[in-house]
Image (tube, grey):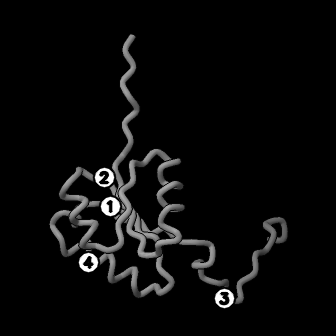
Amino acid sequence: MTLEPRRNARAILIDDDVTSGGLGRTLLQDRGYDVTLVRDPAAAAAAARSTPTAVIFIQAPSAPAEVAQLIQGLKRDDATRHLPTHVLGLASHRPAPKGLNSVARTNW
């Protein structure tokens, strides 16, 4: 019986923060991705041209408007336009509740 080597999906991680890029890469590699770390959409397009890529991840910057600019940059380039794009957020990026409280279902 011959076992084929496990094939990992190739992914690009866009993260402009030098300190968190290694952590993001490690987390994605633990989930089975072969990760190329880049700093901007132009570098992501160059990486996508050089190796077939399955998905792009964006590490959410501190300003939400920057995420939209990153995605627009990816969609303008033929090399990355068709690739699924996922934004990775940190717990601190989650929106705060707006005065809503959870209610136990038994009280309905």
Name the residue beneath numbered marker 3.
Answer: 98
- Viewer-proximal residue among 31 and 81: 31
Image disc number at residue 54: 2
Q: Nearer the viewer, residue 75 or 35?
A: 35
Q: Position of residue 107 (x, y in %)?
A: 84, 71
Q: Amino acid at mark 4?
A: Gly
Earlier sequence position, callout 1 versus callout 2? 2
* Position of residue 4 in the picture relative to residue 97 (left or right): left
Which one is earlier in the sequence, the residue at label 4 or at label 1? 4
Label 2 neighbour load within 10 Å: few <14, some 14-19, many 20+: some
Q: Do the CB atoms of the residues marked 1 and 2 lie less than 8 Å apart?
A: yes
Q: Tag 1: residue type?
A: Pro
Residue that lies at the very extreme toward the right in this rendered image: 107
- Residue 85 point in image, percent of width and height: 35, 65
Q: Which mark is residue 73?
A: 4
Q: Secondary structure at mark 4?
A: helix
x and y percent of residue 98 in the render?
A: 66, 88
How crowded is the residue under tag 1: few (<14 C-alpha within 10 Å), some, or many (20+)? few
Q: Earlier in the sequence, mark 3 or mark 2?
A: 2
> Rounded to the nearest whole Å, what is the CA distance between mark 2 and mark 4?
18 Å
Distance Cα–Cα, label 4 vs label 1: 14 Å
Q: Quadrant of the N terminus?
A: top left
Marks 4, 1: nearer the viewer: 4
| Front: mark 4 or 3 | 4
